[in-house]
Amino acid sequence: MGFYMAKNLISKSPNDMIVYDINKEATKRFSQIELEKTSDSGSKNARIRVANNLAELAESSDYIITMLPESAHVKSAYLGENGLLSKLKPGTVCIDSSTIDTDVSVQISSTIIENGGIPLDAPVSGGVMGAEAATLTFMVGSRNSSEFENAKSILELMGSKVIHCGDLGAGQTVKICNNMLLGSAMIATAEAMALGTKLGVDPKLLATVINSSSGRCWSSEVSNPCPDVLPNAPSSRDYSGGFATKLMLKDMNLSLNAAKSQKIPLFLASLSTQIYGHACAENELANKDFSSVYKWINKK
């Protein structure tokens, strides 16, 4: 996700970019893009610099965008030793596009404010395909509309929709609700496709009918879990790439934790979380796209 988001930023913005990732191969691969571009043009001024640590990145940045898997990673990035806040310049805009616990997001935002920064939570929807095509939807929480508008021009370079959801933490809340629905919808789609094919219906025909009827949804139309129904879907490349099942399990648990704090029962989400847990217990599926839940259902 972060790779393609950064790629769109550097290709559409005139600004230089400083990047950091604990995976050195990721930063090497990313910086190679600009090296190839400058080599082709004859220029010697590469616009991408790889930081040695997050503190070095922070002291040279006016805008910081983080995209990390879990709450603990975001806390470490901002609050840890040599983290972003250790060298944050006053007025730096800090945009976190990770999907994490709302309470943790608000806590980190408060600490950013204490250190003179401007925080926004801006998780995304659209997956790896959306990140690559710059068609992501950003769900943004901010202190006020002016800080949102200031960040919007940056986010629009990576997405097609940038929606102000409310105060700090509101973006995370909306994203958690969206992914809770998505997770359950994918399981329902996988069950429908499994049932229809077992009963002898051609899967492509079944998907065509569903996508022309009231059962139509993103999971059936864009990322159908049945292999070979959609050539560009993860299911047609052995569920590689996409959004990992273990990350969907994480997001489902975020929704359950939020519901518990508000004393709201989530019957379907609870069952869906159990199903993703069982799928992740099979190590083969944990790192596959979450539509691979179709494989788990077909094994039962």
Image (spheres, helix red, strand yellow):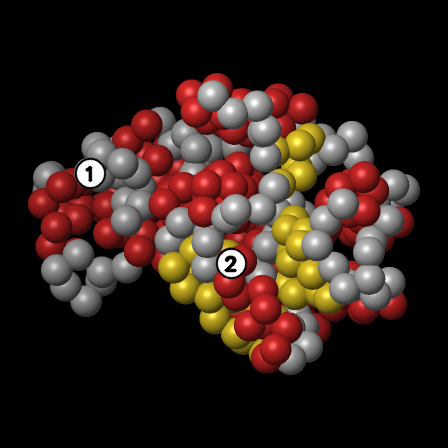
Badge 1, how many Cα within 10 Å: few under 14, some, many 20+? many
What percent of the width, then of the height, locates residue 237? 32, 27
Q: Which of 62 and 179 is in front in this view?
A: 62
Residue 219 placement (x, y as % from top left): 32, 52
Q: What mark, if any, has residue 105 been given in the picture?
A: none
Q: Is residue 124 left or right of residue 197?
A: right
- Name the N-terminal-most of marks 2 and 1: 2
Q: Can residue 153 be seen in this view?
A: yes
| Residue pointed to by mark 2 | 155
**Cα–Cα gap, marks 2 and 1:** 32 Å
- Report x, y in % for residue 52: 78, 30
| Local crowd size for mark 2, using a 10 Å CA cut-off: few (<14), some (14–19), many (≥20) | many
- Residue type pointed to by label 2: Leu
Left or right for 189, reference 128 = left
For residue 73, side relative to residue 130 (left or right)? right
Q: Which residue: 22% across, 60% down? A: 216
Q: Is mark 2 on a helix, strand or loop?
A: helix
Give the quarter of the figure containing the C terminus.
top left
SS category of the residue bearing label 1: loop
Q: Nearer the viewer, residue 44 or 240?
A: 44
In the displayed structure, 121 sits above or below 15; it is below
Picture coordinates of residue 188, whole percent (x, y): 34, 55
**In this rendering, the label closer to the viewer, 2 or 1:** 2
Q: Can residue 283 be seen in this view?
A: no
Q: Disc number at residue 229?
A: 1
Q: Do the residues labelled 2 and 1 touch (CB within 8 Å)?
A: no
Q: Residue at x 28, y 49 (%)?
A: 222
Q: What residue type is labelled 1?
A: Val
Q: Which residue lies at the image location 81% right of the left edge and 47% below the top edge?
A: 59
Q: Quadrant of residue 136?
A: bottom left
Nearer the observer, 202 or 164: 164
